[in-house]
């Protein structure tokens, strides 16, 4: 380990991890990994150590349909922000009457939910425009590693899947939404199989399935540890196979919805970020599929999310009157990389634990069952790593900026034979390797990282919202996963609810759409008036955020004529 | 060089500031890099992507996942020690002192359209769609630039020889960054061919999962709806009870004989009424 990137203290700690490994290996072979926490102990642990329970980091939302909700400050801020179009309200009011594009279905977003919706809307006879912020497929979907759940084996059933989903979600899930999720799951996998997704298979060509955190049956389907990419690349390819029927507008995020005088959604205003033009799109039905909000860096956590995950659809939908649900529950992935600096916050997939790696402390001791539901697992790691003076156990390994615990990956090869890691986890091996770590020989230092938006806009089982003409699906929605999503159920969510919302939108466009009516953005005006009551909302807090701001202070200080704060230029 | 330009001066100031702010974290080293030929001083530990941001670029193109999965940030660079062009993903490559660097976020490449259901999984079919594939001169330029270290030339060669399975496996980790296509003398767009090959292979050569097909059929007949309906109306307390006693596949002592929830047993245990 001479030229190791690990520090001397880390290497000393790794020796301890190695010392306990034979015993842990022997236990794992017997099927024992660690005692699971009872529901009561889990609850106590959560209340003391999960970031969701830190009240100082939260604030009451004062405006809009769900005012009174207590959310993280960063999230309140996107709702208590000014519309990008308000300063030129009259001009926009004039512009929305003469559209630049007219279509049956407008899909906002370019991830798994959006592309699934686009394909289903197309299949149901609609002309589609897909407007997205970066390139199609620059999305959280592309980054998913672990897999996608569906109950397909003879010992599994949608009912058992249902039980796992709802228990993982702390029994807060909407029954109707869970029902659709688990019942559609096998159809979703079969659809992807038919589109040519390269799933991992057993020798008899059945799907290879594994456990994930909180599953009682093995039902995690995967494409090695490129599961999201395996799916996203195919969906993108298929969307691009229909250029006549599905028009892609890239680098053109939506900034506000357009309604009509009957209060129906009839499209959106999009912003071409390259030319800085605003375009008006009229659509008989609209699907909001803008994904999550990891790039808001809630409570200053690093994040696993892609560059464009700034909660835009939440802002637009909320302004148009759609309530939110469970947005206060944020998912921190238990195992984000904690060292070296360049990869802090990036995901070390749950599949590493699913494949047999233990989570151990600085002394090499196990302290938690490695596949607890995510919030419990994350809280256990935070408790173990937090110094004693701050109420933790003080058993974390220190880096120059943070604490972490070890994810003992070499155990996987010892359990299942040399080469297993390289074969099953190529993305992980490659990523840590690029920064000097050989995970087949040494453990990886990990700490929880901001990962997933458990809640979101309220939808119903067909993907509709309370706003006629507006549908939504994927990470943007709330209720499917209660207050805690299990791995593999969100990739499933995006395919199931992407398909449902796309289908529903096409049917709405065909059967329910009356006429365009009189286009308005009155909801933006009214929302601004509500905001105007509060003097502490800064004028330059413009939302949707669109892109995270990583310009360092020393540069900003000299960019005197430019404005920032949630703004682009 | 002394009188290079104004930006040189401002960089001096910049790097001083860096020293001040960095002292607290005990890593004072910055290195000069040339972004599209213009010099900036950046902390030596940053990835190229973060170095661009540190220098003041607000990225729109050339950034996606920030984690090595999306291929948005293909980057080419040279270092003083070599005449060779080096490549990498900006989000996955640490800066080197004196590097000359630019992102290559877009490369014009043709993506053909097709109906995956209708085309057979053969080399001929792929060649009919992308005829240029036959022009490969086996120069290996594509392989040399792949930031994922894939055997890109072999992907093309295996496809030509009709071994779609091998080509699919070899190309599985492709992030579609476009670097291979930018170097190919035969103007082949490797990643578009590779996704076609993977889809064809999985659609037509891998037999469908029978187990999955059976489950889909069962669901079409609503086989499990009763149990789901029953779960849907339980109150939280009852759900909690059933949830906490549910057996976990693979745990010691658990032998699963059925995929039915044992309602009789649950009622006996008082978990449900
Ligand atoms: C690193 C990582 C690993 C994960 N692993 C797993 C896993 O193993 N299993 C699992 O089930 N789930 C996993 N997840 C979660 C899962 O991938 C996501 O929840 C899911 O893919 C979200 O899909 P989506 O389509 O809703 O959103 P996304 O895929 O994020 O797509 C949202 C799209 O909307 C676009 N957009 C944003 N704002 C706007 C706007 N204003 N206008 C237009 N377009 C906009 C974005 O650019 C993007 O293209 C993981 C997530 C991450 C980040
Ligand atoms: S094969 Fe080509 S497109 Fe794919 S990762 Fe390698 S260089 Fe990039
Ligand atoms: S660069 Fe082009 S011609 Fe050269 S080996 Fe690769 S595919 Fe063939
Ligand atoms: S930003 Fe996605 S690979 Fe670098």
Image (tube, coloured by chain):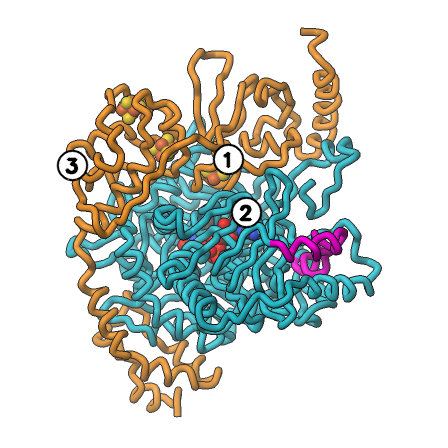
Chain letter for cyan, please: A
Q: In the structure shown, which secondary structural element does the residue marked by tag 3 occupy? A: loop
Residue picked out by circle 3: B162
For ligand 4, tell me if the residue under mark 1 lies within 8 Å.
Answer: yes
Question: Which residue: 48% across, 53% down?
Answer: A129
Residue picked out by circle 1: B91
Residue B153 coordinates in the image, percent (x, y): 26, 27
Report crowding for label 1: few under 14, some 14 to 19, many 20 or more residues within 10 A (C-alpha).
many
Residue A439 coordinates in the image, percent (x, y): 38, 40
* Residue B208 against residue B218 in the figure, above or below: above
Question: Which residue: 74% across, 67% down?
Answer: A62
Q: In the structure shown, which secondary structural element does the residue marked by tag 1 occupy? A: helix
Chain letter for orange, please: B
Q: Nearer the viewer, residue B73 or B20?
A: B73
Q: Mark 1 — on which chain does it sit?
A: B
For ligand 1, tell me if the residue under mark 2 lies within 8 Å.
Answer: yes
Span highlighted in magenta in the image: A75-98
Residue picked out by circle 2: A133
**Marks 3 & 1 on one chain:** yes
Q: Foreground mark, 2 or 1?
A: 2
């Amino acid at each position: 380990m001479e030229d190791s990137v690990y520090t001397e203290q880390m290497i000393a700690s790794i020796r301890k991890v190695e010392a306990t490994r034979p015993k842990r290996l022997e236990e794992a072979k017997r099927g024992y990994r660690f005692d699971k926490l009872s529901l009561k102990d889990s609850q106590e642990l959560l209340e003391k150590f999960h970031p969701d329970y830190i009240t100082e980091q939260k604030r009451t939302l004062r405006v809009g349909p769900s005012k009174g909700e207590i959310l993280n400050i960063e999230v309140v801020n996107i709702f208590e922000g000014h519309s990008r179009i308000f300063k030129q309200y009259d001009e926009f009011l004039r512009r929305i009457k003469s559209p630049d594009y007219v279509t049956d279905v407008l899909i906002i977003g370019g991830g798994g939910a959006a592309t699934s919706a686009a394909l289903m809307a197309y299949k149901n006879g609609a002309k589609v425009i897909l407007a997205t912020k970066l390139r199609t497929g620059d999305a959280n979907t592309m980054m998913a590693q672990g897999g996608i759940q569906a109950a397909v084996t003879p010992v599994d059933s949608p009912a058992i899947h249902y039980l796992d989903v709802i228990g993982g979600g702390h029994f807060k899930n909407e029954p109707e939404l869970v029902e659709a999720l688990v019942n559609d799951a096998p159809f979703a996998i079969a659809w992807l199989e038919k589109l040519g997704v390269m799933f991992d298979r057993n020798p008899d060509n059945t799907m290879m399935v594994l456990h994930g955190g909180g599953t009682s049956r093995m039902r995690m389907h995967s494409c090695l540890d490129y599961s999201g990419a395996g799916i996203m690349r195919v969906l993108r390819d298929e969307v691009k196979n229909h250029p006549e029927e599905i028009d892609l507008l890239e680098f053109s995020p939506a900034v506000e919805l357009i309604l009509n005088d009957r209060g129906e959604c009839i499209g959106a205003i999009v912003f071409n970020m390259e030319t800085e033009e605003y375009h008006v799109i009229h659509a008989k039905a609209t699907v909001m599929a803008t994904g999550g909000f990891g790039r808001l860096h809630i409570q200053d956590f690093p994040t696993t999310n892609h560059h464009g995950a700034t909660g835009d659809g939440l802002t637009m939908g909320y302004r148009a009157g759609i309530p939110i649900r469970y947005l206060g529950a944020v998912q921190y992935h238990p195992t984000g990389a904690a060292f070296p600096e360049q990869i802090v916050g990036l995901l070390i997939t749950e599949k590493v634990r699913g494949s047999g790696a233990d989570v151990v402390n600085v002394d090499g001791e196990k302290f938690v069952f490695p596949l607890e539901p995510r919030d419990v697992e994350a809280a256990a790691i935070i408790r173990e790593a937090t110094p004693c003076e701050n109420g933790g156990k003080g058993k974390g390994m220190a880096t120059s900026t943070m604490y972490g615990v070890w994810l003992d990956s070499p155990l996987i090869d010892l359990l299942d034979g040399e080469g297993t890691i390289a074969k099953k986890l190529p993305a992980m091996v490659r990523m840590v390797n690029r920064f000097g770590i050989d995970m087949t020989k040494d453990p990886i230092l990990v700490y929880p990282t901001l990962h997933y938006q458990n809640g979101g806009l309220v939808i119903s089982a067909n993907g509709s919202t309370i706003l006629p003409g507006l549908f939504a699906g994927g990470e943007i929605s709330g209720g499917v996963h209660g207050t805690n999503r299990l791995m593999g159920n969100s990739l499933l969510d995006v395919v199931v609810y992407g398909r449902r919302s796309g289908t529903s939108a096409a049917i709405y466009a065909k059967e329910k759409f009356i006429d365009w009516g009189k286009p308005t953005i009155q909801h933006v005006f009214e929302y601004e008036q509500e905001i105007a009551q509060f003097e502490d909302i800064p004028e330059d807090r413009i939302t949707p955020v669109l892109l995270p701001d990583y310009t360092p202070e020393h540069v900003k200080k000299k960019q005197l004529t430019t404005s920032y704060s949630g703004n682009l230029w | 060089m002394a009188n290079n330009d104004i930006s040189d001066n401002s960089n001096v100031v910049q790097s001083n500031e860096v020293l001040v702010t960095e002292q607290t974290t005990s890593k004072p080293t910055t290195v000069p890099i040339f972004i599209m030929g213009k010099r900036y001083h950046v902390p030596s530990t940053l990835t190229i992507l973060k170095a661009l941001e540190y220098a003041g670029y607000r990225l729109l193109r050339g950034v996606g996942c920030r984690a090595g999965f999306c291929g948005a940030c293909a980057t080419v660079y040279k270092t003083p020690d070599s005449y060779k062009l080096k490549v990498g993903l900006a989000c996955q490559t640490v800066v080197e002192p004196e590097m000359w660097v630019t992102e290559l976020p877009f490369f014009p490449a043709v993506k053909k359209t097709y109906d995956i259901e209708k085309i057979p999984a053969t080399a001929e079919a792929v060649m009919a769609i992308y005829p240029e594939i036959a022009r490969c001169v086996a120069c290996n330029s594509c392989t040399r630039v792949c930031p994922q270290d894939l055997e890109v030339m072999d992907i093309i060669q295996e496809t030509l020889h009709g071994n779609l399975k091998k080509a699919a496996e070899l190309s599985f980790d492709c992030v579609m960054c476009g670097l291979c296509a930018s170097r190919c003398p035969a103007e082949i767009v490797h990643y578009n061919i590779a996704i076609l090959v993977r889809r064809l292979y999985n659609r037509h050569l891998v037999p469908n999962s029978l187990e999955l097909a059976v489950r889909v059929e069962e669901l079409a007949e609503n086989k499990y709806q009763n149990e789901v309906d029953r779960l849907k109306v339980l109150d939280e307390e009852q759900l909690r009870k059933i949830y906490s006693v549910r057996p976990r596949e693979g745990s010691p002592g658990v032998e699963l004989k059925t995929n039915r929830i044992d309602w009789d047993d649950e009622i006996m245990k008082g978990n449900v009424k």
